[in-house]
């Protein structure tokens, strides 16, 4: 089923702030198989010039779609989750994510288009601290296989 | 936050040698839990086949994380990455055996920019397939 183009331009504010914890960063680093001590050990992170444990570059995927996820679940959009695969992903970093950060993200559906038999949907999320400091911007494109057929 | 690779010692066209990253079903289960992406195509073979896939496939973000690890291990500091983007061009099929799949990542310094930034073009393969395309990381070197 074609996705509802009326959703392009819609923005979804963050819910409650996402608290980045050392435990979650360590769990994520273990899941991607990265043993870098900077993801686990505060002293190692400080020795490298960081205020606290650093999150791996792809860690923002954990929280950046919290608000966008609500949009994708809206029945009015017409997305069949079973047919979804990831198309593209990009992160622009203003600074690394650190343990102790309290982050909010505003997600905006920036594009919906067809490519062959598939539907493509792009969400941009602006991630800031609760104080408004920019942290990163993420761009997520998902593909609904066969959605345009 | 300081990279260990020096900007002045890097040349355009310089190759960053390939590294193999193994991915087995266990890694996908761990990644599902850590990332919160519980899409069944990444752990349930029955479901994956029902929706027309050859078998369980890796999370695209798992593959992106491996290529990210390749970049941060080279640069020497995860905080040095200022921009990182990929297109997922092919699926990484992960069979339910002891071997799983292997993702081979390599890179080349494509461009030197101002502010000690360099663009690294990344290649990621699984078997015969290019699993990432347009994969670029911008890194601030020392």
Image (tube, coloured by chain):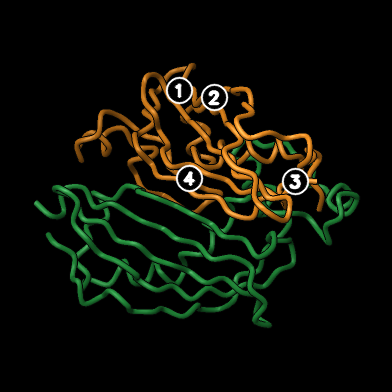
- For label 3, the SS is loop
- Secondary structure at numbered mark 4: helix
Q: Dots 2 and 1: beta carbons under 8 Å?
A: yes
Res. A16 image quadrant: bottom right
The label shown at residue A37 is none
- Quick check: A51 left or right of B88? right
Label 4 in the same subunit as label 1: yes
The residue to which callout 2 is attached is B22
State the residue position of label 3.
Answer: B141
Local packing at callout 3 (Cα closer than 10 Å; few below 14, some 14-19, many 20+) is many
Q: Chain of mark 3?
A: B
Name the mark nearer the viewer: 3 or 2: 3
Q: Residue at x 34, y 72 (%)?
A: A71
Q: What shade does chain B have?
A: orange
Asked whether the beta carbons under mark 4 and mark 3 sit within 8 Å of each other, the answer is no
> Where residue A88 sits in the image (x, y, percent)?
39, 50
Q: What residue do we see at 49% from left, 17% from top?
A: B98
Label 1 SS:
strand
Residue A103 coordinates in the image, percent (x, y)? 62, 72
Q: Chain of mark 4?
A: B
Q: Colour of chain A?
A: green
């Amino acid at each position: 089923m074609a996705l509802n183009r009326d959703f392009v331009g819609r923005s979804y504010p963050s819910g409650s702030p996402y608290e980045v914890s050392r435990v979650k960063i360590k769990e994520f680093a273990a899941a991607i198989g990265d043993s870098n001590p900077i993801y686990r050990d505060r002293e190692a992170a400080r020795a490298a010039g960081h205020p606290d444990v650093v999150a791996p570059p792809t860690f923002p995927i954990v929280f950046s779609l919290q608000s966008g996820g609500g949009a994708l679940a809206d029945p009015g959009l017409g997305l069949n989750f079973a047919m979804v695969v990831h198309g593209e992903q990009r992160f622009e970093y203003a600074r690394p994510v650190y343990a102790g950060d309290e982050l909010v993200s505003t997600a905006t559906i920036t594009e919906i288009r067809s490519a062959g038999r598939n539907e493509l949907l792009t969400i941009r999320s602006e991630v800031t601290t609760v104080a408004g400091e920019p942290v990163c911007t993420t761009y997520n494109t998902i593909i609904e296989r066969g959605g345009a057929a | 936050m300081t990279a260990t690779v020096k900007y002045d010692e890097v040349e355009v066209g310089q190759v960053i040698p390939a590294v193999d990253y193994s991915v087995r079903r266990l890694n996908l289960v761990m990644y599902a839990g850590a990332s919160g992406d519980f899409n069944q195509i990444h752990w349930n073979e029955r479901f994956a086949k029902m929706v027309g896939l050859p078998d369980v496939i890796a999370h695209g973000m798992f593959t992106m994380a491996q290529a990210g690890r390749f970049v941060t291990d080279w640069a020497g500091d995860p905080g040095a990455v200022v921009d990182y983007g990929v297109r997922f061009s092919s699926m990484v099929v992960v069979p339910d055996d002891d071997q799983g799949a292997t993702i081979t990542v390599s890179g080349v310094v494509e461009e030197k920019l101002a502010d000690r930034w360099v663009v690294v073009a990344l290649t990621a393969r699984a078997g015969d397939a290019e699993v990432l395309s347009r994969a670029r990381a911008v890194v601030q070197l020392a």
